[in-house]
Structure formats: structure tokens, C-alpha cells
Amino acid sequence: MNILKFVNIASYNDIRNIIINARNNAIKSAGFQRVLMYWHIGERIYVEEQTDKARVNYGEYLIRDLSRELENEFGSSFSARQLERARKFYGTYSNINDVRPQLNWFQYWLLTDIDNSLERIYYANEAINQSWTGRELERQIKSQLFERFLDELRVEQYDAEEAEAKKKKILKRVSAALLAVLRYFGLVKNVPDKSPNTKPMDEYMCGGNGAWFNSVVVFFGDNNG
């Protein structure tokens, strides 16, 4: 039952959608702020490691001590495992401009495990374009979608090359017959006796850019009426 007495239902739905979209955007924004937080943490850990590279296992001890203090104050989101992942995240995406706001921390967690940069870019783009959740991205990675994509490209390339080879073979086989027809109807000029394949046929025809073939089509078309 409609309880709105003074408000148009369309206006109400528009306002309702504005609120829902704002909430969703706030959630996404919060997710991206989390991503940026881990990127900056990873950067800071990396910089700190460089200050004492000579000390054996310094990075390991650094992360262990950091996680102990951070977990006490902020909780399990800053465990040693998370900090190690943050460091790896920064190492993979050292240019912050490469960090995409459409992806969340779990998705970046998955992407940083991919060593092949082209494969990583492929999955990132697909996750954004297809609006994948983190679990969907994980499923697609496990299903080796990128490898299947490459296989399809190889097949398409082979088919294209095979089609082009067949086209050239057919043209070569019919060129002699076409030349004879063109000679008969006077559509060629001074064609030498040597193979027409030794020189582009258009140079002997009544015009370039495929005019010789068009002439044949037009001629027979005109005579079929």
C-alpha cells in the first residue's frame, strides 16, 4: 500500500537510489583507503629495510617486532602475514599511480601472488571490467583463465594466417585463368608472357587498386542482364 500522500513515487525512488549509491561509494572508498594504507605501510617497511641491509634477516625481525606492537594496538589486521603482504604489495606496485581504486585489498592480495606482469594486468583489468568480487577473481585465477585466453589467441592467429595462405593460393591458381579472360575481352594492356606473379597485375590493367578484378565483376555483371 502506498503511504506517500504528497511525494511522487518516482521522486522517492530517485532519492532512495541516491542514498544507496552514496552508501555503496562510501564502502568502496573505505576499501580503497585500506588498500592505500597497506601500500604506504609496505613502502615504509621497504625503506626501513634498506637502511640496514647488511644485518642478516633484518626484514624478518623488523616485521615480527612491528606486528607484535601493531596487533596489540590495532588488532589482527596488522599481523606479520599482513605486513609481509603489504611489503610484497609495494614491491609489486611501487608506482602508486598503478594502484586501481576499483580493486580491494583481497583482490590485490591475490594479484601480488602472480609473478607474470602481463597475467597480473589481465586479471586486474578483467576484475574491473567484469565487476568481479574477490572470490570470483580467485576462482578465475585457479581456473587458469589467462592461459585459456592465450590459447584462444593462438588459435585465432593460426586461423587468420591459414585463411590468408589459402586466399593467396587460390588467387595464384585463378590468376592465369583470369588473365586469359581479361585478354580475350581486351581488359588488359601489354601483359608480358611471363608469369603475372612476377609483377603486380594492376600495373597491366585499366586502373590500379584492384580495378582489374572490379572490371571482371562489372563486365560479367553487365552481360548477365
Image (spheres, grey):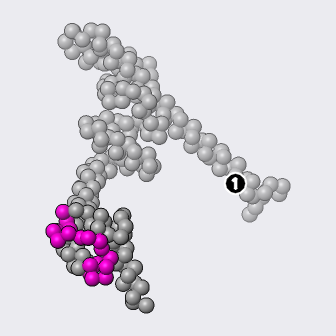
Query: Which residue was labeled with disc 1?
Result: 13
* In magenta stretch: residue 197: yes
Magenta-drawn stretch, dominant element (helix, strand or loop) = loop
On the image, the x and y values in percent for residue 21 come to: 61, 45
The quarter of the rendered structure image containing the N terminus is: bottom right
User: Is 96 above or below relative to 65?
Assistant: below
Residue occupying the point 21% across, 15% down: 57
Q: Is residue 194 left or right of residue 65?
A: left
Q: Can residue 155 be seen in this view?
A: no
**Quadrant location of residue 177?**
bottom left
Q: Is residue 177 left or right of residue 207?
A: left
All told, the count of numbered labels is 1
User: Is 168 above or below relative to 10?
Assistant: below
Residue occupying the point 36% across, 26% down: 94
On the image, the x and y values in percent for residue 68 come to: 34, 18
Q: What residue type is labelled 1?
A: Asn
User: Is 115 above or below relative to 179?
Assistant: above
Q: In the rendered structure, which segment of residues is drawn in magenta?
A: 181-198
Asked which secondary structure carries label 1, the reply is helix
Q: Is residue 224 left or right of residue 32?
A: left
Residue occupying the point 27% across, 9% down: 52
Q: Between residue 29 and residue 170, name the one nearer to us.
A: 170
Residue occupying the point 24% across, 11% down: 53
